[in-house]
Amino acid sequence: MKERLTTNSRKWFGVLVAILLYYILHEGAHLLAALCFDVFHQIRFMGIGVQIAARTELLTDLQTAVFCVVGSIASLIGAYVLVWAAKFITKSGSKVLKAAGYYATIALLVLDPLYLSVLYRFVGGGDMNGILLFGLPEIGVELVYGAIGVVNICIILKYIYPAYKKAFAGNGE
């Protein structure tokens, strides 16, 4: 029972790290953009979520579009860095590091593509509304993020899941 509790604690810690890393990358990119454009207003804490509020009325459409897209770009760059780093993380002797790496990689690969291809319609389209100010058709943006999501799921199934499964099995788990 104690080993099971430790395993569950490690998994929940990994999920917590994934959530925190997502917010640091995604909202951190929004924060940097707001600071660069000198329009930072406040950091909003909403439930377990965080949102960077900017004075968008002071931005041009292009600046607003950049402000909105940088979060997903930062998250995806972070995801691909973690995919690359998986070969090192999975060799670590730390099960906690492996759990954090596994859940963070999956979260970063999936969250923004899923949100910007489907979910934004149901939970508010803040980033999508801004991205559309690039002059792109909404369906085009949805399809691009959907395609990125499909590729990322393939990366998870072909590389991430097998690598971490093997790494955890090698530790007697």
Image (cartoon, grey):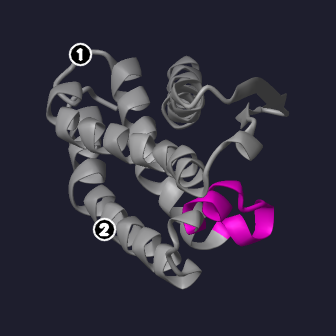
Specify few, some or many for label 2: CA neighbours under 10 Å numbering under 14, 14-19, or 20 or more: some
- Name the residue located 51 percent from the left edge and 24 percent from the top edge: 10
- Name the amino acid type tagged 2: Val
Whether residue 169 is visible, yes or no, is no
Vertical placement of 165 versus 159: above or below? above
- Answer above or below: position of 146 versus 112: below
172 or 156: nearer the viewer: 156
**Could you say which is closer to the camera, residue 36 or residue 16?**
36
Residue at left offset 56%, top offset 44%: 67
- Residue 77: image location, x then y, percent: 32, 42
- Main SS, magenta region, reads helix
Residue 120 within the magenta-colored segment of the rendering: yes
Q: Indicate the quadrant containing the C terminus: top left, top right, bottom left or bottom right.
A: top left
Callout 1 secondary element: loop
Q: Quadrant of residue 145?
A: bottom left
User: Across the whole image, how many numbered discs are drawn on residues?
Assistant: 2
Q: Is residue 28 left or right of residue 148?
A: right
- Residue 24 image offset from top left, x and y in percent: 53, 26
Find the distance from the CA under tag 1 to the CA under tag 2: 30 Å
Indicate which disc residue 93 carries. Answer: 1
Q: In the rendering, which numbered label is found on residue 149?
A: none
Q: Is residue 23 visible?
A: yes
| Of labels 1 and 2, the one closer to you | 2
Residue 151: give its label. Answer: 2
Q: Which residues are magenta?
A: 119-132
Q: Is residue 145 above or below residue 99?
A: below
Q: Is residue 122 left or right of residue 62?
A: right
Q: Amino acid at mark 1?
A: Gly
Q: Position of residue 26 (x, y in %)?
A: 53, 38
> What residue is drawn where x is 50% and y is 51%?
69
In the image, 148 versus 163, the foreground residue is 148
